[in-house]
Amino acid sequence: MVVITGGIDLSVGSIAALASVLAATFLGMGYDPILTMILVLALMAIAGLGNGLAVTYGKITPFVVTLATLTIYRGLAYIFQVGSLVTIEDRTFLSIFAGKTDIGGIYTPVIILFLALGTFVFILRMTTFGRRLYAVGGNAEAARLAGAPINRDIVIAYVISGTLAGLGGLMVTARLSTGSALYGQGYELDAIAAVVVGGASLMGGKGFALNAVLGAFLIGIIRNILNLTGVASYPQMVIQGLIILVAVLLTTMAARKKA
């Protein structure tokens, strides 16, 4: 959603790490797992709100804002961690975000994925809010003159981004049974790569939730192939960067040809 508006969010990995540490901290203090989930997602929504307000009302470039908050939120994660990894033993929390269901043994993260995907496919295609996001990314001034509340819509997009990054952090935390400020490093590149490979334009106005998920699957498959063939981690980073570059180049060329 952020990319559709013509913005970018580099802070998603740091938000995921902050969510991880806070979840482990709250659970360690004896909080109910459902209450922990609500508190963490609400706080990550506030983190996204901060990004959105700085972009819209602070008139700061999204790249600069989220580059700064990438460092800020990661620093907060280290502050709240206070030392070593925090182990999570709450079985309810672990089963919600990393357990198996009774429906064919499907893992809960898969169910969360499809619920989120269905929700945002519907929002982007079937609601006025979703259509306004495309309008803002396509031509913000035209959208403003048409009466669209562009600042509010952009802020909401960043709030949603922060909330979902927090949700991803909770799932990683449950899968590894620990909370750590080290989680989420490089996630911002994975997110951008998935969106771009899925056909979205970094200039805004183009993109679709399903395509972004398919882009993430494609990158995951490529990464697995590289691991199986024995390619080291550093060359994999080079290859991932090249994938992003080629995808952006192809998208730009297609847009120019269409124009």
Image (cartoon, helix red, strand yellow):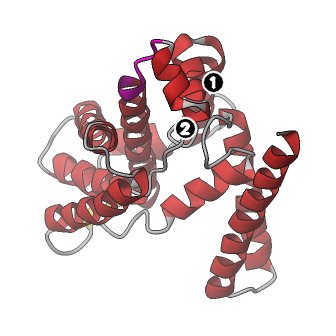
- Pick the front one: 209 or 201: 201
Residue marked by disc 2: 108
Mark 2 and mark 1 lie on one chain; the one further toward the N terminus is 2
Element class at badge 2: helix
Relative to 238, is 44 on the left or the right?
A: left
Q: Which residues are magenta?
A: 147-152
Name the residue at 27% across, 31% down: 38
The quadrant holding residue 241 is: bottom right
Name the residue at 25% across, 43% down: 58
The quadrant holding residue 57 is: top left
Relative to 188, is 52 on the left or the right?
A: left
Amino acid on which disc 2 is placed: Thr
Vertically, is 102 above or below 2? above
Place of residue 51 in the rendered image (x, y in percent of width and height, measured from the top left): 31, 45
Query: Can the viewer see residue 101?
Result: no
- Pick the front one: 246 or 194: 246
Q: Which circle marks residue 95 in the picture?
A: none
> Is-magenta flag for residue 176?
no
Place of residue 87 in the rendered image (x, y in percent of width and height, measured from the top left): 28, 62
Place of residue 25 in the rendered image (x, y in percent of width and height, measured from the top left): 18, 53
Vertically, is 5 above or below 246? above
Q: Which circle marks residue 118 in the picture?
A: 1
Name the residue at 75% across, 45% down: 199
Q: Residues within 10 Å of mark 1 (few under 14, many from 20)?
A: few
Extreme right residue here?
Answer: 257
Distance between mark 2 and mark 1 Cα atoms: 15 Å
Element class at badge 1: helix
Amino acid on which disc 1 is placed: Gly
